[in-house]
Image (cartoon, rainbow, N blue to C red):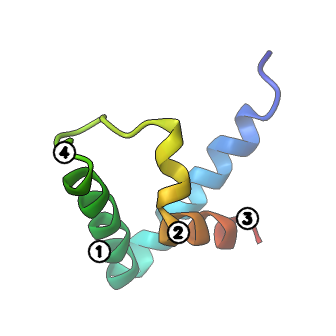
Amino acid sequence: MFGGTDTSAHTLAMCAYYLAQQPAAAERAAEEVRALLQGSGRSGVGELVAEDVSKLPWITACVNEAMR
């Protein structure tokens, strides 16, 4: 039931750390989310759904890089 929670938390923490070290990459990630929300007619915090992950290639690349 709780398998992978520590790994997921560590991956997200490392991704946040690396993005904090690279402001241009962080801004690109934020812009990707803003564009997705605007293009779908949604706006605001917390409105991303699991299906949106496939529409965020830069953030996916950042997470993959954090797992390296």
Query: Which type of secondary structure does the marked residue at label 1 adopt?
Result: helix
Indicate which disc, 2 or 4, sits on the residue closer to the N terminus: 4
Q: Nearer the viewer, residue 9 or 34?
A: 34
Query: Which type of secondary structure does the marked residue at label 4 adopt?
Result: loop
Instruction: Report how far apart the C-alphas of labels 1 and 4 lie in the structure.
Output: 21 Å
- Using the image, tell me which numbered label, if any, was put on residue 27: 1
If the image is split into quadrants, where does the C terminus sit?
A: bottom right
If the image is split into quadrants, where does the N terminus sit?
A: top right
**Left or right: 30 as drawn, with respect to 38:** right
Residue 33: image x %, image y %?
32, 58
Instruction: Report how far apart the C-alphas of labels 3 and 4 lie in the structure.
Output: 32 Å
Q: Quadrant of residue 48?
A: top left
Label 3 packing within 10 angstroms: few (<14), some (14-19), many (20+)? some
Amino acid, disc 4: Gly
Indicate which disc, 2 or 1, sits on the residue closer to the N terminus: 1
Q: Which residue is mark 3?
A: 67
Q: What residue do we see at 48% from left, 58% from top?
A: 55
The mark closer to the camera, 1 or 4, is: 4
Query: Which type of secondary structure does the marked residue at label 2 adopt?
Result: helix
Amino acid, disc 2: Pro
Residue 22: image x %, image y %?
41, 81
Amino acid, disc 1: Glu
Q: Which residue is mark 2?
A: 57
Q: Which residue is mark 4?
A: 41
Amino acid, disc 3: Met
**Left or right: 34 as drawn, with respect to 12:** left
Residue 6: image x %, image y %?
73, 37
